[in-house]
Structure formats: C-alpha cells, structure tokens
Image (cartoon, coloured by chain):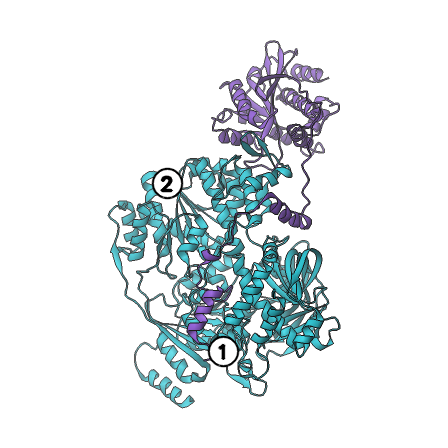
Amino acid sequence: MSVSLERLLRLRQQAGLGVGMPARIAPNAAKPQPAGVTIDVLRRLLGTRGRLQTAIEPAAGMHSPDRTLSGEQILPGLFLVDRLLPWPKPCDAIVVDAKTYGPIEPSNALCFDTETTGLAGGAGTRAFMVGISEWTADGLRVRQLLTATLGAEAAMLRTLADWIEPRHVLVSYNGRCYDSPLLATRYRLARMTNPLANLPHADLLFAVRRRYRGVWENCRLGTVERRLLQVVREDDLPGSEAPAAWLRYLRGGDAINLRRVLAHNHQDVVSLMLLLGALAAPGPREGSCDESATALAR
Amino acid sequence: MSIPVHASFESSSLVPVDPRLDGQALATRLQRKYGDRITGTFLIPGSEGRYAPLPADLPPAMVAALRARGIGQLYTHQAEAWDAAQRGEHLVVVTPTASGKTLCYTLPVVAAAMQRQAKALYLFPTKALAQDQVAELLELNRAGELGIKASTFDGDTPGDARQAIRLRGDIVVSNPDMLHQAILPHHTKWAQFFENLQFVVIDEIHTYRGVFGSHVANVLRRLKRICAFYGSTPQFILCSATIGNPKQHAEALIENDVTAITQSGAPTGEKHVLLWNPPVVNVDLGLRASARSQSNRIARLAIKAKLKTLVFAQSRTMVEVLTKYLKDVFDNDPRKPARIRAYRGGYLPTERRTTEKAMRQGFIDGIVSTSALELGVDIGSLDVVILNGYPGSIAATWQRFGRAGRRQQPSLGVMVASSHALDQYVVRHPEFFLQASPEHARLHADQPLILFDHIRCAAFELPFAVGELFGPVDPAVYLEALAESAVVHREGERWEWIADSYPAQAVSLRSVADGNFVVVDRTDGRQTIVAEVDYSAAALTLYEGAIHMVQSAPYQVERLDWEGRKAYVTRTHVDYYTDAIDYTKLKVLERFDGCVAGQGDCHHGEVHVARRVSGYKKIRYYTHENIGYGPVTLPDSELHTTAVWWQLSQQVLLDAFASKQEALDGFIGAAYALHTVAALAVMADGHDLQKSVGSGDGSWFARGDSSGHARASDADGKPILPAQLAIFVPTVFLYDNFPGGIGLSEPLWRRQAELIARATALVGACDCLVGCPACVGPVLASDETSRGASPKQLALRVLERLAVP
C-alpha cells in the first residue's frame, strides 16, 4: 500500500476534494463571502454576460416637457377621462349567444378593455389603463382610468370596483383569457376583492370566431371594425406599442404616445359596444339595431 | 483453482434444499473461483429492525389505512420524524434506500391534511419519482378512504386539470423547475394553495448541489417570500441519500435550523462488497480484460443462481450492449417473457413504467441501467448489484449498492474496475474506497449572477419594498442593476417590475438545453415513436448510420432532422454497434483581463468551447473489433462561456522539463489539482466547472488518457506528438460549464494566486508517493514503481512556476 490511509484522509480534509473524491472539510469554513458585491462588481459580471447574451440597454434619463395627460386627476397619480357619446341606446335585449349568456339588457352591458405592460403574463404584468363603456340615458358613456405612477394602481382598482355593479354583464374581446385573469391577479396582489369574479362575461372574440373564422383573414378587433362595423381608425397606435408608451412616460419621457394609447383604448371599448349590437342574433328588431350601430360607427 | 469450485458446485447440487443462493454464497463462490481478480472484500454487517408503535395522535382512518397495507408499527426513524414534525421543526431524513423514508413525510402531511386542511408541496428532481409518489399516496388514500387529493403538477399536466389541482389539491407533487417557471410566477392563481401551505417536502436533496443547488436554494427563497405574502410559513421535511453533510446541506438549502434524523430503524441484511479488477490478458502491454466482459460474467452467474441482479453501466450504449449479451443467454426463447431488461433515460416513460412494474412483481431477473436507477424509483428487491466501472464518487457507489439487500438477506455488491486510471486506482487501494466518507454536497446561493437571476424573478412575482431582504441578502444593488436596464422601477419605497418579459423563462435551473429528439421507427411504414433522446446526447447517438438500441433491439438511423428534432430509424439486424468519435476544442474569443502569475500569466475572458462528433466506429459484438468507420456531419455543440486560464512560456518550460511530453504531463496534473481547489473555492459541483489543457489558440489540446499521461491532438482531433508542437504554450483552462457563464470563473481569476498556492499545498502535502486521486489525479501502477519524474513532481514544477515567488 503506497499511501497511508490516515494521511490520505487527513489531506483530503485539508484539500476538501471535489467531484469523485471524498471530502471531510466543513464547507462553511470555505464559504465564499457574499458581502462586497457592489454595483460595480455586478455591472462587470453582468457586462461579461451581456457580451455573451444580450446587451443591456442603458437607462435613459428622460425629462420631457410634454407630459400633459388628458382627463382629470381624481386621485394622486390617477387620471379619469369621462366622455359621453350622445348616441341612442338600442332598444331591446341583445342576444349574442343565447346558450351561454342569455339575452343581455343593453343598459347592463359593461364593455371593458385594459392596456397592460405586456403579454408575458404572470404576476409581473400590470394594467396601467382600463376603459369601460356603458349605455346611459343620454348615450354611450366611456370612462377611462389611467395611472401615471405605479402607486396609483390601487386607486385605479378601487375606482373600477366602485363602478362595477352586480347587475352588470361584462363584455370584452379576449377578456376571458387575458384582461379578466390579469385584473384578478392585480386585485389579488393588492389584497382586494375582485369585482369581476362572479359576473357573467361575454367574450365577443368567441362569437366572432364562431361566425367569421375562415371567412375573414383573421378575427382581430381591427378586422372586425373594418369588415363589420365600417370603423376606420386614424393615427392608431398599435396595441403592441402601448407598454413602451407608458414606460416612457413613467420614466420621465413625453406623453405623446401615451395619449394615443388613451385614444386607442377609447375606440376599443366603443367598438366593443358596437360589436355587441352587430352580433345580435337575428330577431324582429335586428335590422334597425344593426343599422343604428353601423350608422353610429360612421 | 477450477477443481474445488467444481466440487462446490457439485456438492451444492446434491443438497436437496432450495438451490437458490444468497448474496453471501455467491460472494464466497466468486472469491473461491476468481480470488486473483478480487482486490478487496468488505462485509457490512446487517442489523435488526428497531420499531416504535404507531403514534397515538394519528387519525384513526390513517391507522386503518396503514394496517390495511400491513403497517402495524413504525421504524424508529419514522417515529422520530413524526415527533419532530409535530414539534414544528424542519427536518431532514437521511436513511438508506428502502428504509421507508416516504412514511416520514406522508404521516405528518396526510394527518395535517385530514385534521386541518393543510396543503403540502412535494418536490422531486424527476417526473418519474413524482409519479411514483402520487401512485403511492393514492393507494394509501384508497386503503383508508382518507379523501386526500394528491396529483402531479408538471409539464405533462393537461391544462384543464391544472385549475382543479390549484384550487383543490391537498398534496401537489412537482419539481423545482416547475415551481420556478410555472407556479411562483403565477402565484396569484395558487392563492388558496399558498394560504394553506403547511408542508414543503423535498426528496433527494443530495441532487441539489453545486450550481443546480444554488439555483434551488434561491427558488426556495422565492417560495418563502410568496408564502409570507399569503401569510403562511411552511415546515420543511427533507430527505437525502447518504452524503457527508446532510444536516448542513439541508440548512444551506432552506436557510433554517434543521433536525437531522440519520439512524435508520429498518432492518438490513448483511452486505458483501467485492472490488474486482479484470485479469491481465496481455502481460507485455499490461492490458486487462474489459470491465464489460467481467460484469457480464458475474451477472450471468448471479442470474443463473436465481438472484435478482442489477448492473449499472456508465453510458447508454454500454447499457444496451450488456443487455444484449445477457438477453442472448437468458432471453433466447422469444415465446417466453423477457427476463432481462434495460432501463435508462431516453426510453419512453411508458416503457420505463412497464419495466419498473415488472421488476416490482418479480418477473425480471436481470436489469441493466444507467444512473437513472440511482434515485429512489421503486423497483422492489434485489440481491446483487454490479457496477460496470467506478461511478466517480463514493456517495454514488453506496447509493447504487444500496439497491441490493432489501429483503434482510445477505446481498452482494461488486465494483468492476474499468481501465480508467481512477477505477484502477480505487481497486488498487481498497482502503481509499471503504474508509472514505461520502462526499459533501455544497452550494453557494449567494453567487452573484445566480442571485441576480432569482432577484429578477422574485421582483416579477412581488414588488420589493426598500430594505426588504431576499433570504439573508440585501437585494439593493441587484435591484439598482435591474433598474438600469429598465426591468424594475423604483417609486417611493417600492421596486416594481415594469418590463414586458417573463424572467423565469430565461433562467434554467439545470444546464441542459431544451428540445428533446424523438426517434421515429419507420420500419414497414410504421411511424411510431420508439425513444426520446435529450438534446445533449443527440449528436452522440443519433447521427445518420448510428445503431440506436432500445431494449437491445437495434435500429439504424436513416435520417436525422436536426432542426425538426427527429431521427428516423428502421429496425435492423446487424452484428455491430456504433460508437461516436468526438472531441472538444476550446478557443479564446476575448481576453477581459490578465495579470502576471509567477513566471507565467493568468487571464480571464470569454471562450468558445465546441464539441464535435467527427465520425463513428462500428464495433462488432463479442469480439469488440473495430470493423469500420463512418463519417458524421453535424453542427458542433457550442458553448460560449467565461474562463480563467494560466499559461507558461515555451522558454520557461524547456528550462524546467526534460521534454514537452513531461511538461504536458505536468499541466494535466496541475489542471487536476487546480480544478479540485477551484471547485471548492466557488462551491461548485465538479461538473459545473470544466477543465481543459491546450494551446489557447485552439491549435492543439491535451487530455490525460487511460494511462494517466497527456495525449495531444490537433484541432481536428488527430493525435499529435508533443515534440511536434512548434509553438508550445500549454494553457490550463477552467471554464463555467454554462452558456454565457454563470459567474464562477471571474472570482477564480481574482483569487488566482490563492488557488495556485492552495493547489501547490494540496499536491506538495499529499502523502502519496507519485500522485493519487487526492492530488494530481489517479496514477497507474507503473508510475508507482517508475524511476522517472513522478506525475506529482511534474505537476508541482508547473504550479511552482505559476506561483508568486
């Protein structure tokens, strides 16, 4: 035997051998110090990785003079845009999909749409804007809430909750899979009761798909507007650019695109209400309802 | 020698009792017949069971369920676990395979679920183990009509089942990757679950070490943070195979005090262990018979003696070859059910389930496996375990031997050495093997880049309040770095996530690439999937022309659709198998920083590591002669990563060494020692950090071959003599084995002088004569008697020249 076992074991203890070899050292003794990680050390480490993976975009210090938002600041950081479109309310209950929703009384329909920080999903995606539209005696009322700060989110959620009543039927476009779960997550994170939780919800995307899949090139809301509602948007900011617009404003940049997001969101909830009318199942008053809806859209 | 053995066979056949041997009898027989091949024998004595009554506070329905399944009392360690759990302590149970570890957590978890609607999360390292666990829970549930809902939650869980599991599951059985990527980022959907989460059970914690362990420790920090949000503080029950530091490792993982339960009360039969060195077949060349031939022979003897036998092989190909040889003997009648099965990663889950079940039911007499059976997959009892080659660590060796001896009868474990230097060292020095304690598991949760990744994920899950800690760490600088890249935004006292990304998607806990290949059998117009091969193994096993074996049935790869991740095969009948020829080359892409290191220098930078399969060999069954080559054209598997490296100039080396060969031998030894001390310095697992010796410009590389000496090869993998190397600047590289680097090599560069000093001390103070696995790597017997400069001296010459004078 060429090695003294005792020596070997002792040396192993000293050396604390890696894979394949036994070690009896106390790893705590050799535990690397976590302290001393400064932002410079971290930047260097990340810089190394940045070169290998994706370059990290430097944060721009933006201070734009054009920071005006439309609407009224109703709570710190929370803006409300409240508009009334003096259009006549449809007369009869609307039947979109009798099996699922039954007839919807127009004055109970609450169309809603959120603008969010992205499509990634999960707890890190937030809604920075929510718009609703509903019929009132004087016409179609569109209300939009916009948060200008992160902290205003709780106020936005609370205000929205105040607007929602048990009589409401939610109307959305892909809201079942997107807006509604996202708001549920935000209410959960804010430790508030989710006001949408137990309301009936008519997601018009499903109805549109049932009727027009394979008929139209796709079932996007823009396509619906063009082919069914004869609505054409002007200077519309694509929904995909909304997160960047808000982020820009949040970090001190200009509000130009954020105002366009407001306009975009406004049109979304208006179109939703028109679509609800347009999708009404054939019935005695179908012609007139449809007509009024398309007429209004023009 | 053969005569007395004959006699013993005959005498045993005359005794009119059960002809079935046990492990002890087989050990004795092997020792008598092959005494000259056995370099060491150990006997691990058996022990009586120690029992405790079922706890008085166990719900009556559970008592009934346990009794219905034949459990009327507990082993002492199970009772201890119950008591510790009832006291509210975190605990780790470290007892051998088949000692009833599962009950240690099932009892407190199920009792709490019945008594107070407590929820539990189980984490297993693999899906298969998770499925076993759920099957077992469901059986217990049925036996006592306990009304407990247990389900797996992993990538295979259908979408419509997920909602029900989130809302109503009492016990959710998943894995750390799923927790990291699917559960925590969507925690709001799991609100009810987290509000009532009282137990987190983590089995096989010894697998969570090194970089993987550091990731998992951070996932647990995130889990605790989410639980705190929902007002719960779960209790952790951990289990581990034998490692050197179970309590400490458990505490490093969950960052809390942990009660360790290490004394098993389960009875064990005695275990005989033999170390086996294949006989020398060519005295002139010192060539030994292959480990394969010996494992095959021992397995045959064991199976003929009606002993349930498991053979562990080191590669998937070797599993298939050994399976074929055993099938040729035992499964030559196709009308009878198979007695021999193979078990390895790459088989379809259903195939593996079938094999596991057949094993449990005792239909299978011999099974050949990779390390896939090292973990706690339930395959019932075994009598003999044969290791075809040393698994590389003491802990893995015992873990594998632990598969034998479930029936309180004598069992047998045989470790058959391959020709690798490490194997040879172990069989030459049995004491090294027997008396060494199992390896320590290490992790370093605060490694900055890993921490950065998880703070990023955590910020996505919940905003950070200023001053809030992440585990014990103040995340402020990490959050500032995230804010610089517009990922989080600080407003007032909170850091909030603002980016449009899902960070957990970009962070993989394991360094495995995605994208399994499916193997499609096109024989006779079939289009059926016969196997699934993970990305890392695809280039080595699915090249066109490869013989791909499933349960030793050969299929030939006709077309490989690399992009589509498919290999099309047809059933074939050939007398050979194929073996890929691959080599790895490393090239420096960019040097970030450098400094003087003694008479040489040390650098830190970015490197490109490419592994290329250049061709394959056809190897005939049984004779193992090479009967042909085939070309392979596949993309290199590439890794861009960071590295630290040391080099010495040609002049310094020529002054110090008699030849370039000696200098290279010195570098190989120095690299071994540096790798050892470096892995410890950054708490990495050996696999996390890789070593390489080469020229730095990619023109040549050197590897220690099975003789323990350096073999150089050029950039195309062709052998080259060191003397022919015109530009001779050998370089030792240590690189992060992770795409993009994981931050191991940067601190190594800053600590380079210390590492050289520690490596020098390691080698210099080692008590071996010429070198050993504890310092410069295993050496051959010939080195131990050679008069030239020893591997140890050569390595020291290199290290001393890199040391600060």
Amino acid at the residue labelled 1: Gln
Chain drawn purple in the picture: A
Q: Residue A191: where, in percent of width, then height?
A: 47, 29
Residue identifier under label 2: B118
Q: Quadrant of the C terminus of chain B?
A: bottom right
Q: Residue furthest front?
A: B805
Whether B322 is drawn above or below A263: the answer is below
Residue B84 or A240: which is nearer the viewer?
A: B84
Same chain for marks 2 and 1?
yes
- Which SS class for mark 1? helix
The subunit carrying tag 1 is B
- Label 2 secondary element: loop
Residue B294's mark? 1
The image shows residue B697 at horizontal and vertical percentages of: 72, 64
Indicate the chain on which mark 2 is placed. Answer: B
Q: Residue at x 38, y 65 (%)?
A: B381
Identified at 26% across, 52% down, the residue is B54
Q: Amino acid at mark 2?
A: Ala
Q: Is residue A60 left or right of residue B407?
A: right
> Is B455 situated above or below B593?
above
Q: Nearer the viewer, residue B726 or B296?
A: B726
Chain B drawn colour: cyan
Label 1 crowd (10 A; few <14 / some 14-19 / many >=20): many
Residue B532 is tagged as: none
- Examine the rendering and report whether any part of residue A80 can be seen: yes
Image quarter (top left, top right, bottom left or bottom right) of the N terminus of chain B: bottom left
